[in-house]
Image (cartoon, rainbow, N blue to C red):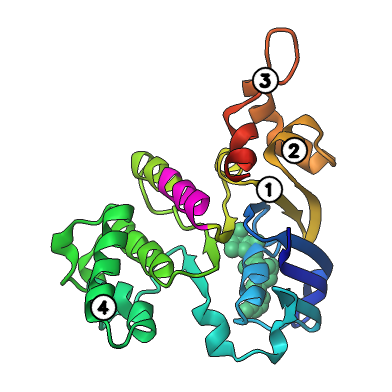
Amino acid sequence: MSTAIEFRNICKSYGEKVVLDDFNLCIEKGEFVTIIGSSGCGKTTALKLVNGLLTPDAGEILIGGEDISGMDQVQLRRNIGYAIQGSVLFPHMTVEQNIAYVPNLLNRHDKKRTREAVDKWMRIVGLDEELKRRYPDELSGGQQQRVGIARALAASPELLLMDEPFGAVDEITRAQLQTELRRIWEQTGITVLFVTHDISEALKLGSHVLVMDAGRIEQYATPAELLRSPATDFVHRLVERERRACRLPDGQLADCEWSGAGAARQ
Ligand SMILES: Nc1ncnc2c1ncn2[C@@H]1O[C@H](COP(=O)(O)OP(=O)(O)OP(=O)(O)O)[C@@H](O)[C@H]1O
Ligand SMILES: [Mg+2]
C-alpha cells in the first residue's frame, strides 16, 4: 500500500482563530475516507488544503509523496475532483458544458469521447438527458448537486474530495448516490475524502472514518473498529446509537453491513 495523501505537521489559522494545530494524518491510496465532526472543527479547511485552495501556515501536504507547494496548481487541481454542497457550477455554461469541461481539456481532439463521458456520468448520477441543454439556474438544488458530482467524476480524478455532497437531495436519491459512489470507488481504485454530518453515512460509505473535534483527530479507524472500540468520549457519543442498532441479544456487536465495507475492494 502506498500513501495517497499525507498531512504533515499542518497548522492553519484564520487571523487569531487556530483551526488546525499540528495536524498529522496519512491516508493510504484507494481508501474511502469519511470525515465527520462538529461544525467548525476544520473539515472543509482540511479538504481545501489538499487541493491547494488554501495554503498551510506551517507543515506540508504530500500527494503521492510529493509536497504540493512545489507543484503546478492548475495541474494539481485537474487531478483532483472536488464536489461541494451548493452549486459551484459555471453559471454561463449548460449542464453538458459543465460536465464536459475537464474532459474537453483532456481529449481536445476527441469530441466523441467527451460526449460519451458526459452521457455516461449523467446516467450514473441519474440526470435525464433532456437536462443537457439547461443552465444551472434552471435546475433544482438536487439536480445541480448531481451535475456537480458528475463534473467532478468526469475528470477521472485519482483523488476525489467531497464536502457534504448529498446535502440537498432526498433520502431515496441519497441512497442511490451512495450506492453509485461506492460502486465507482470499488471499480476505479480512486481515493475519496468525503465530509458528512451523518454518522450512519460515514460508517456505511467509509473504508476508514476520520472523526475530528476542534481541529484534532479523535480517531482514524475502520467503521468496525470505531464501533467496537471508540477511542474517546466524543467518538463514543457519536457512535452510541449505531452501536445499539448493531447489538445482538447476547450483547456482542453484530457484524454490521458496514463492517464489511472496507474489505469490499481488497
Ligand atoms: N475564510 C475564513 N475566515 C475566517 N474564519 C474562517 C474562514 N473559513 C473558515 N473559518 C473558520 O474556521 C473554522 C473551521 O472552518 P471549516 O469550514 O473548516 O469547518 P467545518 O468543519 O467544515 O464546519 P462545517 O461542518 O460547519 O462545514 C470555523 O470556526 C470557521 O468559522
Ligand atoms: Mg464545512
Q: Main secondary structure of the magenta part?
A: helix
Residue lying furthest top: 250
- Counting from the top left corner in percent of width and height, residue 176 is at 37, 43
Q: Residue sitting at 65 percent across and 28 percent down? A: 241
Give yes or no for contact between labels 1 and 2 (Cβ–Cβ under 8 Å).
yes
Q: Residue sitting at 69 percent across and 8 percent down? A: 249
Identify the mark at residue 209; answer none if there is no mark.
1
Disc on the earlier residue, 1 or 3:
1
Disc on the earlier residue, 3 or 2:
2
Q: Residues within 10 Å of mark 3 (few under 14, many from 20)?
A: some
Give yes or no for contact between labels 1 and 3 (Cβ–Cβ under 8 Å).
no
Q: CA distance from mark 1 to mark 2?
A: 8 Å
Give yes or no for contact between labels 3 and 2 (Cβ–Cβ under 8 Å).
no
Region in magenta? 179-188
Front residue of 50 and 155: 155
Disc on the earlier residue, 4 or 1:
4
